[in-house]
Amino acid sequence: MREFADGASGKITGNIRFLGKTLKAPLSGRKCAYYHVLIEQYESTGRAGHYMTKHESEEAGDVIIEHNGTYAVIHTNLIKSYLVDDRKYTSGLLKNTTPQLEAFLKNHNLSSESFLGMNKSMRYREGILEEGEAIAVMGKGFWKSKEEFTFPIPNPKVLVIEPDSENPVYLSDDPETVK
């Protein structure tokens, strides 16, 4: 990361640091810098069926990574992410949702029960970026002074990764991508 040329595009890797705004993951309640949630419901089509997406959302706090004492701030206004689902839940026949899942569904005008009161077959997936987690980021980078940021970064210069005119910032915590 230290050798990243100002104005160049490329890939960096590092570990998440909680130096700025963090979030609470909506399904698990864990502290994170970024999350992705996917909720699907099983739809039967006679003999077969498939899962249909009922809700999908992502949210970012301040995504800051560090590698060997060098820090990068990731702009998340235009991002394509692939986060590993590190929490998975299900509900359905004889398996109720947790109160936290039920509250999330209600906040998004969804329900885990049919109009007859039977549980729907649903699955819930959540991926987050938590403190110390290794991630890979690809985008256009510019070096800026630490005084431009409100969080306490110890280095005088900070790499800022942002989208360019043609591509978003790509972000992943997949171990294969981080290598």
Image (tube, rainbow, N blue to C red):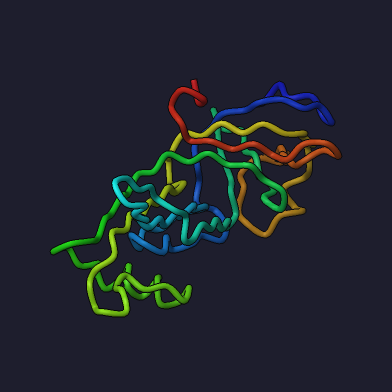
Give how far across and how far down residue 140 sits, in percent.
77, 34
Q: Quadrant of residue 143?
A: top right
Residue 167 picture location, percent across and down: 77, 36
Closer to the camera in the image, 104 or 41:
41
Residue under the point 67% across and 50% down: 76
Task: Name the quadrant containing residue 41.
Answer: bottom left
Q: Is residue 50 above or below residue 96?
A: above
Residue at 47%, 55% in the rendered image: 53
Q: How many marks?
A: 0
Residue 69 at what x, y percent from top left? 56, 32
Asked if residue 61 lies left or right of residue 150, the reply is left
Q: Quadrant of the N terminus?
A: top right
Residue reaching furthest to the left? 94
Closer to the camera in the image, 118 or 21? 118
Q: Residue at point 77% right, 53% down? A: 148
Q: Quadrant of residue 70?
A: top right
State the residue at coordinates (32%, 49%). 87
Q: Position of residue 138 (x, y in %)?
A: 67, 31
Between residues 174 and 3, which one lies in front from this camera angle?
174
177 up-or-down from 121: above or below: above
